Structure formats: C-alpha cells, structure tokens
Amino acid sequence: MPRIWFVKRQLRTSLIFVMVLTAGCGALKRCAYEGINRDAWQHPEQVIQSLGIQPGYHVADIGSGGGYFTFRLAEAVGPAGKVYAVDVDFEMNEYVAARAQEEGYENIQVILAEPNDPLLPESGVDLIFTCNTYHHLADRANYFARAGKYLRPGGRIAVIEFNGEGWLQQLGGHWTSSDTIQRELKDAGYSLDREFQFLPKQVFLIFSRHQT
C-alpha cells in the first residue's frame, strides 16, 4: 500500500511538471515562485491579518514574483491605498501588470527594480513587505539601510523567509535564519517589533526604525 501511494504521488507530481512546461516559461516561473499547495503552508490570510495593514496604506511588495501576495495586499489597502509590485524580473512584472489590469486592480503599480534598490516613489510607503526573497538579496544590511529612505514615519519592514528546515531549502541555500535576519536588520538601523511563529516553513519578522 505505501508503495502504491508513493507511485501515485510521483505520477501526480510529474503530471503537474509536464503541464507547467507545456504552459510556457512564464507559467514555469510562477509555479517555481508559488510552489505546490502553497496556501496550505503559507497561511496567506493570517499573514495579511498579522501585518496590521490599514485602508489607505502604501505597501511595497519586494520580490513580488507572480503576485501571490500583491493582490492580497491590494485588497487589504483598499481603493484608497497603493501596492507597489517590485521585482527585477521583467516577465513576472508584465504578468502582474496584465492581471491587475484585467481584474480591475487600479491600486497596483508595477516597478522594475534594480538589484540594490527597489526604486520606490519619493512619496514613500508605510510597509515594505518581502516574502521568500531575502536570501536573493546581496549585501542585505546595506540594501535595507538604503531602503529606509522610502519608509514614511512609523513605517515598518516585514520579512518572511524560508527557515532552512527542509532538505530542498538547505540544498539550494534558499533560506536565512531568524538570527541572521535580525542581526542584519539591526545593522541596517532597525529594531525587531515582533516575531510570529505560525508559519511551518518560514520565519516571519516585523521591524521598525531605531528610535533616535
């Protein structure tokens, strides 16, 4: 019986992989960004609730990818708010922009960022949010130190990152420990406000600027 279950699971995974490949490169990227059954372990509704977003907020989704959180954030800020979908991947940005237009999300703006700068507007944001992107950033302390110029008074940074407990994360190096994130954000000029523990595969930290 266990052997039959394993074979069925492998066949199901292979079928999904083939379907994604035939759908094109963009679909393959989105699948890589979002994973399989992501809602089951990402708990997106609880994440959004934990961010304490108010209607009218301006939020930057750094490393927005295919928009997994972008559209949820757009719902949270409401029509008076703004969500900046920020990524260095032109193709993913085009996908998010097209979907936003098709579904009538007028409060989403796509930004093609530079590797060392999210290029947010001078008007600033109330929240910089990043999920599963932290390990891709180079010189992270300096990155977030520079990003601080985009934060409005009282603005915060939320980091969700893989915790390295899965073998696949460890194999690819696609994770960062909570201690490392806290140390680097402290060096960048931030203080830890809260650490949530409800995500099984990830750390979830919220920071604010050091009080001077």
Image (cartoon, rainbow, N blue to C red):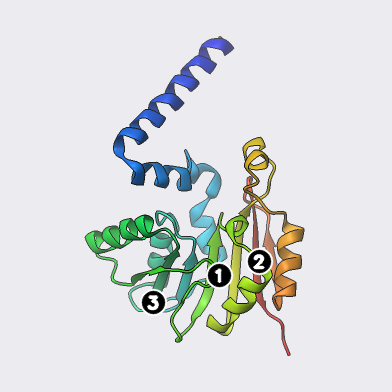
Residue 79 shown left or right of residue 187 in the figure: left
Is residue 118 something one can see in this rendering?
yes
Q: Label 2 near label 3: C-beta < 8 Å?
A: no
Chain-order first, disc 3 or disc 1: 3
Looking at the picture, tell me which residue is in the foreground, 28 or 130: 28
Is residue 151 something one can see in this rendering?
no
Label 2 element class: loop
Residue linked to disc 3 = 81
Residue linked to disc 2 = 139
Disc 3 to disc 1, how far (Cα)? 26 Å
Looking at the picture, tell me which residue is in the foreground, 9 or 66: 66
The percent position of residue 38, horizontal first and vertical second, equals 49, 44
**Amino acid type of the residue that numbered disc 3 sits on in the rendered structure:** Gly
**Amino acid type of the residue that numbered disc 1 sits on in the rendered structure:** Asn
126 in relation to 105, above or below: below
Q: Label 2 near label 1: C-beta < 8 Å?
A: yes
Q: Residue at x 53, y 50 (%)?
A: 43
Disc 1 to disc 2, how far (Cα)? 8 Å
**Amino acid type of the residue that numbered disc 2 sits on in the rendered structure:** Asp
Q: Residues within 10 Å of mark 1 (few under 14, many from 20)?
A: some
Q: Residue at x 34, y 59 (%)?
A: 96
Looking at the picture, tell me which residue is in the foreground, 200 or 64: 64
Q: Residues within 10 Å of mark 2 (few under 14, many from 20)?
A: few
Looking at the picture, tell me which residue is in the foreground, 205 or 28: 28
Q: Residue at x 45, y 86 (%)?
A: 123
Image quarter of the C terminus: bottom right
The percent position of residue 89, horizontal first and vertical second, equals 42, 58
Label 1 element class: loop
Disc 3 to disc 2, how far (Cα)? 31 Å
102 in relation to 186, above or below: above
The percent position of residue 178, horizontal first and vertical second, equals 72, 57
Residue linked to disc 1 = 116
